[in-house]
Amino acid sequence: MLLGSIEAGGTKFVCAVGNEDYRILDKTKFPTTTPEETLQKTVDYFKQFKDLKAISIASFGPIEIRKNSPKYGYITNTPKPHWKNVDFVGRLKQDFDIPIAWTTDVNGSAYGEYVMATLFNEKINSLVYYTIGTGVGAGAIIDGNFVGDLGHPEMGHVRLKRHPDDLNFKGICPFHGDCLEGLVSGPTFEARTGKKGQDVPLTDHVWDIMA
C-alpha cells in the first residue's frame, strides 16, 4: 500500500511516498514559491504513483483544521506572501479522490516522533515537539491525542520574560512583535545583526540573549 506525505514548509516542500511499515520509498523537495506553482508541482509528483491510497499534509500556517468550518483545509491568515486564504486540501482533491489528512507542520513532526517511539517500544504516552526555524511552533500529544485538534495551541506566540540586554528589540512577529517567535525565529538574526544565523559567530552575545 502506497501512502503520500507532504511536509509543507514556508521555505520548501518535501513530498514523499512510503508504505504502511513507515518505510520511505521515494521523495522529492522543491522551494515554496507561489501557491499555484508549488501545489502544481505537488500534484505532478504524486500523479506518478498510480496506487496511492491516501495523502497526509503537515503544513505551515495558521491553517483551518476544524472540519465543520467552510474553510477547512485552508492556509488562513499567514504572513507568508501570496499564501493567505489558499485552499490547500481543495486543490489536491481536484486531482486525487482519496483520503487526505490535514494538520499543522509541528503536529506532523510530533506525531512522527510519537509513532517512532512506540515502534521501538519506548514507554511514551505524551510529548511536546518544538521547532525553531522560519517561525516557532510546537505540537503536543497527550495520551496519544493531539492537543488543540480544534485549533492551534500557538505555543510559538507565548509572551515571555525578556533578557535584560534585549529590551529595545521590538521583535519581528507581525501579530505580536516580541512573542517567542518574534524574538528567536531564524529571521530574527538578520533583523538583529544584519547577518543570517549561520554567519553569526557563536561568541556573539546575541546567542546568549536568544537562548
Image: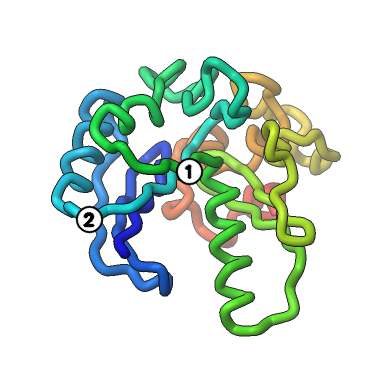
Q: Nearer the viewer, residue 188 or 104?
A: 104
The quadrant of the image that shows the N terminus is: bottom left
Q: Look at label 1 and name its amino acid.
A: Ala
Residue 106 spot, x, y in % from top left: 57, 48
Which disc is residue 101 wearing?
1
Give the x, y percent position of residue 17. Answer: 29, 59
- In the picture, the disc for residue 51 is 2
| Label 1: which secondary element | strand
Q: Earlier in the sequence, mark 1 or mark 2?
A: 2
Seen at 54% across and 41% down, the residue is: 103
Note whether residue 193 is visible.
Answer: no
SS class of the residue under badge 2?
A: loop
Q: Quadrant of residue 88?
A: top left
**For residue 12, what is the image quadrant?**
top left
Give the alpha-carbon distance from disc 1 to disc 2, as whole Å. Answer: 17 Å
x, y (%) of residue 29?
26, 51
Name the image quarter holding the C terminus.
bottom right
Residue located 65% across and 19% down the image: 175
11 on left or right of 204: left
Q: Amino acid at mark 2?
A: Asp
Q: Is residue 138 left or right of residue 55?
A: right
List x then y, in percent, for residue 120. Answer: 59, 83
